[in-house]
Amino acid sequence: MIRTMAVTHKGEVLLGIPLMDIQLDKYTWIWADFATPTDEETLLLDQYFHFHPLAIEDCMHILQRPKLDYYENVQFFVLHALNDRTLEAEEIDLFLSEKFLVSYHHQEKTEMNEAWEQVKSEIHSRKGWSGGPMAAGYRVMDKLVDKYFPSLYSIEDELADLESRGSSQSVEELMRQVFDVRGRLLKLRRTIVPMRDLMYRIVNSQHVQNNGEERIYFGDIYDHLLKLTDMIEVDREMTADLRDSYISLNSNRMNSIMKTLTVITTVFMPLTLIAGIYGMNFRVMPELDWSYGYFGVLLLMLGLGMGMFRWFRRSGWFK
C-alpha cells in the first residue's frame, strides 16, 4: 500500500493522490509512505523516484544495520523500529530530499501512523516545527525512539520485582529469570546502540542539517538514545549483581548442607568403627562372654555420639 501526502504552495495538505499523478514541481513537498508494499509498488522507487539501485537493494534485503548514505541530493536512512513482543528490530527506510520524503517498511508500524498524523495535524494547524521533508523525517525518528522506552521501563520494573522476591523463590527460578532479562537487554542493546551511532552522525553531518534549529531537534533524539544506552548498561550491571548474589546465596546454602552432612558423618564414624570391630567373627573376643557386653557397647556408642554432638555445637559448627 502506498499513501501520499502532498503539501501545496499555499500550505494545504492533499491526501491520497495516486503517486503516478503527482508532479513534484506543483507542490512544496510530498510524503510517500510505502507500507508493506507489493513488488509492483516497490518498482516505483526506481520508475518514479529514480533512486540509486544500491539504496533500493538495501530496502529489499532486510535487516540492514542503521546507516546514512548520500545519493545525488538524496539522503538514504536505514532505521530500526522495535517489535514490542519479541524485542526484535524491524527495518524502516527513509529517502529524504528538499522535495520529498519517502518511507519504506515491510511491517505496519504504529510509529509511522503516529508520525503521519502528527505531521498532517501540524501542517493543518500551522503549529510546531514546519521544516518540510526534514521535519517529517525528524517526526518519524522521534516516534521510533520514543517506542524504545516502554520496553526498557518494563524490564526495569521486572528487575525491581526480582530484587523484592529474592527470598521467596528458588535460586534456580531466579537465575532463569535473570538470564531471561539479560537476553532481552542484549536484544535492546543491539537495536539502540547502532541507532545512537547513526543519530550522532546525523547531528554532526553537514549534509543533513540546514540550520541550527534542526540540529537541536535531532540532538534531542540523540540525548534520548544516550539515556537509553545508559539505562541498558545500568540494568545489565544490576542483573550481573543479582546473578552474583544468587550464586553466592546458592553456595552458602550448599556449604551449610555440606557442613551438616559432615557433622553427621563425623558423629557416626566412631560408632561405625565400634560396630565394625564387634561385627568381626573371631573366636577369641573377651567382651563376647560378658553378660552385659551388648548393653555396655550401646551405652558407650550413645555417650560417644552425644558427647561429639555437644562438642561440635559448642565449637559453632551449627551456626
Image: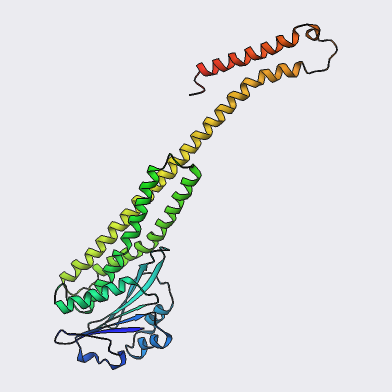
**What is the count of numbered marks?**
0
Residue closer to the observer: 205 or 292: 292
Q: Quadrant of residue 197?
A: bottom left
Q: Is residue 103 left or right of residue 303?
A: left
Residue 207 seen by the camera: no
Indicate how the structure is coloured in the image.
rainbow
Residue closer to the observer: 312 or 212: 312
Q: Is residue 42 above or below residue 282?
A: below
Of the 4 image quadrants, the one containing the N terminus is bottom left
Percent x, y for residue 70?
A: 30, 78
At 44% from the left and 77% from the top, the residue drawn is 61
Q: Quadrant of residue 294?
A: top right
Percent x, y for residue 53?
A: 39, 84
Percent x, y for residue 79?
A: 34, 71
Residue 57 seen by the camera: yes
Q: Is residue 189 left or right of residue 8?
A: right
At 31% from the left and 83% from the top, the residue drawn is 3
At 20% from the left and 67% from the top, the residue drawn is 217
Percent x, y for residue 148?
A: 33, 62
Q: Is residue 290 above or below residue 36?
A: above
At 36% from the left and 91% from the top, the residue drawn is 47
Q: Is residue 100 left or right of residue 185?
A: left
Q: Is residue 86 above or below residue 291?
A: below
